Amino acid sequence: MQIVSVDGRNPEVFRRFFEVRDAVRREELEFPVGLGLQEARVLFTGDHSAARSDGLGLVDGDTWAGIAWLDWWLLDNTDTVDVELAVVPAYRRRGVATRLLDAVIERVQADGRRVLSGMNSAGDPVTGESVGTAFAAARGFVRKHAELQQVLELPLPSEQLAALDRPVPGYELVQWREHMPDEWLEQFAVLLTGMTEDVPTGDRTIESTRWTPALIREAEARRVAQGRFAYTTAAVHTASGELAAYTQMGGTPETPDRLSQYDTYVHPTHRGRRLGIAVKVPNLRALQSGLDHSAVLHTFNAPENTPMIAVNEKLGFRPAAQRTTWERTL
C-alpha cells in the first residue's frame, strides 16, 4: 500500500478520497454530518484566509483503504492542525490508521506545528466512547472537550412552531439569506467574535477568531461557491439599534437530507430574555419554507451549555451522539 497526497486538483483522486470519508461517516453515525463533494473540493482548491485543507490517502492497488483529512489554520491557532482519519471496514485492524497517522505527524512536524487535534463524532451519547476514542487514547492523544449532538426531524408542524413563537418586547427581528446587509456587517463581526470567545471549549489549545467584515464576506463567497445556502435571523435591540442575538441554519442540495444548525449566540448584555428561542423559531420557519422533503437538522453543544441545550429540547431536538476532541502535543 502506498501513501498519496490529495489537494483537490485532480477531480477523480479527490472523488475517491471524499467517498471514503463520506461512506465511513454514514456507516458510523445514525445521523451523519459532513460536507458534500463540491463543498469539500472548494475547501481544498480555493484561496482562503483562515484555513487551508488537504489530505492523504492509503491506496492498495486501485482500492482506497483509508484517508486523513487535514485542516491547517492560518490566522489563529497556527500551531495546530486538525486531522480526521477514516478507514474502510475491510481494511480495519490492519494498521491503516496507524500508518496514516505516522505520515500526518511527519508532515505536521515538518511544517513546524506542535499540536495535532482530532475529533471523533461517533461516541456514545452519554459516555462519548467509541472505537475511535480508544484508538486516539492508545496513540497518545488526550481528551480535551466534548459536545452533544442533537437532531431534529423536519418539517415540524406549523402549530408546534406557532406555540413556541413568542416576540420579546423591545426587540425586532431581521432576516437574510446568503448575503448580510451592509448595515449589519460591523456589529455582526462583534457577535461572531463573541461566539468564538464564549463558546465552551474545554481544555482545548485554541484561540478565538477575530472576525472582520472582510472575513464575513469571504465566508459568504465561499459558501456560495460551495453551493450552500443559509438562513439567518437576528434580534435588534430597538432602543439602541444593536444586534443582540442571531442564529444561522443551512445546508446544501448535495445532501438534502442533512441540514445544520450553525451558531446561535446572544450577546451577554441581552441574555435572560428568551432571545435564543425567539430567533430560532422564525429561522426554522424560514428554513422549512424552502423544504419539499423530510430532513434532519443537526446541532452540537457542549454539555455544560445547558441553556442552549434546553432551548433545543423545547423545539424537539433529541440526543444522537457525543463528539469529542482529542489533542496530541508533538
Image (tube, rainbow, N blue to C red):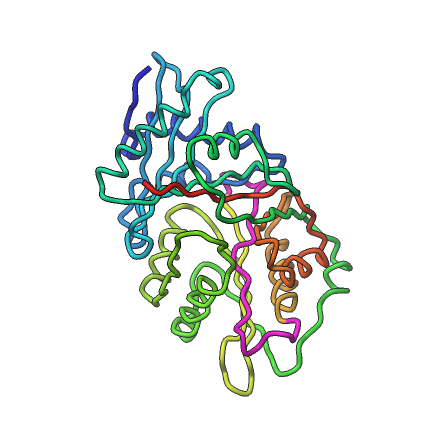
- Image: 57 above or below 215: above
Q: Nearer the viewer, residue 270 or 146?
A: 146
Give the percent coordinates (x, y) of residue 47: 26, 48
x and y percentages locating residue 193 in the rendered image: 42, 66
Q: Is residue 140 above or below residue 114?
A: above
In the image shown, does 221 or 211 lie closer to the viewer? 211
Q: Is residue 266 magenta?
A: yes
State the residue at coordinates (38%, 35%).
69
Q: Is residue 207 magenta?
A: no
Q: Nearer the viewer, residue 289 or 330?
A: 330
| Figure check: 257 above or below 198 | above
Instruction: Tell me where the magenta segment starts and ends, as one range.
Output: 253-274
Q: Is residue 267 left or right of residue 139?
A: right
Task: Say which quadrant the C terminus sits in.
Answer: top left
* Residue 30 point in image, percent of width and height: 63, 35
Instruction: Name the image quarter holding residue 17.
Output: top left
